[in-house]
Image (cartoon, rainbow, N blue to C red):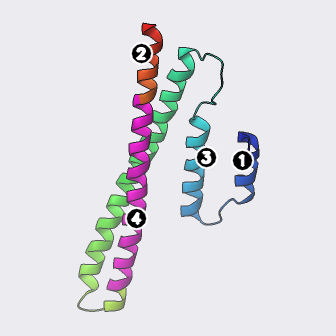
């Protein structure tokens, strides 16, 4: 298996070129970096608190992206309605863009749910450590 440093170097070599792909690449890197390293040593509560804070930051970024995507979907829907009678090609293009934005939105929602689950797991881990 690759270590974190090797995986990071490998992913940096394959860095994407367009803006949308760069956004997802950078977000993925931030989420991976925010996850604490797994080790056999006992971790202090501070590391869990820091991990929870980083997950909250990632959640805020994704929530902002979700709002942007929802706005773009609505704009494309309105544009498709406007162009339906006059220019069907433009309407079809708008519907294709809308579908693309909906796929991206589903990815964002999936990532948000994973982040929320991770936050809950860290919170439970903190509580369990304090109780013992």
| Residue shown at the point (48%, 40%) measured from the top left | 58
Q: Earlier in the sequence, mark 2 or mark 1?
A: 1
Residue carrying label 3: 29
Towards the viewer: 31 or 117 = 117
Q: Position of residue 132 (x, y in %)?
A: 46, 7
Looking at the figure, which quarter contains the N terminus?
top right
Q: Mark 2–mark 4 contact, CB under 8 Å?
A: no
Between disc 2 and disc 3, the foreground one is 2
Relative height, residue 114 to residue 94 (above, below): above
Specify which label sits upstream in the sequence, 4 or 1. 1
Which residues are drawn in magenta?
A: 91-120
- For disc 2, the marked residue is 127
Residue placed under numbered mark 4 in the picture: 103
Which image quarter: residue 100?
Answer: bottom left
Q: Nearer the viewer, mark 2 or mark 4?
A: 2
Secondary element at tag 2: helix
User: On the rendered structure, is 29 left or right of 110?
Assistant: right
Q: Secondary structure at mark 1?
A: helix
Q: Residues within 10 Å of mark 2 (few under 14, many from 20)?
A: few
Residue 130 vertical placement versus 114 (above, below): above
Q: Nearer the viewer, residue 62 or 52?
A: 52
Query: Label 4's element?
Result: helix
The answer to whether 32 is drawn above or below residue 105 in the figure is: above
Q: Residues within 10 Å of mark 3 (few under 14, many from 20)?
A: some
Q: Measuring from the top left, give residue 38's x and y in whole percent.
A: 63, 29
Label 1 sits on residue: 7
Query: What distance separates the C-alpha of mark 4 from that of mark 1?
Result: 27 Å
């Amino acid at each position: 298996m690759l270590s974190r440093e090797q995986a990071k170097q490998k992913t940096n070599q394959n860095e994407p070129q367009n803006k949308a792909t760069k956004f997802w690449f950078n977000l993925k890197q931030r989420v991976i970096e925010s996850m604490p390293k797994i080790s056999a040593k006992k971790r202090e509560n501070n590391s869990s608190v820091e991990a929870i804070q980083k997950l909250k930051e990632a959640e805020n970024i994704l929530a902002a992206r979700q709002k942007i995507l929802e706005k773009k979907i609505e704009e494309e829907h309105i544009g498709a309605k406007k162009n339906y009678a006059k220019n069907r090609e433009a309407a079809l293009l708008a519907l294709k863009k809308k579908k693309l934005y909906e796929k991206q939105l589903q990815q964002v929602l999936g990532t948000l749910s994973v982040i929320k689950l991770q936050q809950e797991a860290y919170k439970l881990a903190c509580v369990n450590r304090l109780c013992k």
